[in-house]
Image (cartoon, helix red, strand yellow):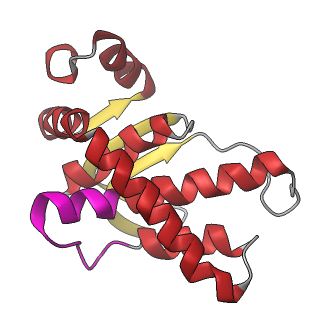
Amino acid sequence: MTAFHEAAHVVVAGAVGLVVDRVSIAREFDAHYRQWRTGVTEIRVIGDIATDYSHEMRQRLQAEAVFNVAGDVAERRAFGHVSPASKDEEIAKWLLSRDARPRDLPRELRHAQAIAERLVRERWRAIERLAAALIRHRTLTRAQLRSARRSKSTCGQI
């Protein structure tokens, strides 16, 4: 389940222009949040959302919202439900809430989910291949992901 979830984050991140530095399905301690977690996709952080109100940052936050809900979309597609431990929808709401009025937030979230659903559907084979690679390797770096993308055969290169 976690492998499909994280694979969808990676594949959708690329589709919306985000850079993934690392993805893992291994159990790890998150020093920032001081808790154990299983499954993480780390994207390159650009700018400061607290001070940057440019059009580019607004687009970035929308892309990150799509990226965040993609894992849940893939879980639902593969298994018919989403893990109750997932907090990705809450993160997406938080990202969108910076620029959306409270009454518009549900619509903005539905829009992000619709984009994620389309991208997951269109790229399902790539998600399946990456999930298989994650099951084998547990953690993949940016360099390994780039190599796999160039070869267009995630299973063969990683």
Residue 95 rendering spot, x and y as whole percentages: 63, 67
For image coordinates 70% across by 50% down, the residue present is 59
Residue 41 rendering spot, x and y as whole percentages: 41, 47
Quarter of the image that includes the C terminus: top left
Residue 153 rendering spot, x and y as whole percentages: 21, 17
- Place residue 114 in its image quadrant: bottom left
- Place residue 22 in its image quadrant: top left
Residue 26 rendering spot, x and y as whole percentages: 25, 49
96 relative to 153, above or below: below
User: Which segment did they paint magenta?
Assistant: 71-86
105 relative to 26, above or below: below
On screen, residue 157 versus residue 136, left or right, reads right
For image coordinates 49% across by 76% down, the residue present is 90
Q: Is residue 34 magenta?
A: no
For image coordinates 13% across by 69% down, the residue present is 80
Residue sitting at the far bottom: 103
Q: Is residue 74 magenta?
A: yes
- Place residue 86 in its image quadrant: bottom left
95 relative to 158, above or below: below
Residue sitting at the far top: 151
On screen, residue 121 versus residue 55, left or right, reads left
142 relative to 50, above or below: above
> Is residue 30 visible in the rendered structure shown here?
no
> Is residue 112 visible in the rendered structure shown here?
yes
Quarter of the image that includes the N terminus: bottom left
On screen, residue 47 versus residue 93, left or right, reads right
Depth check: give the residue in front, 50 or 16.
16
For image coordinates 20% across by 38% down, the residue present is 134
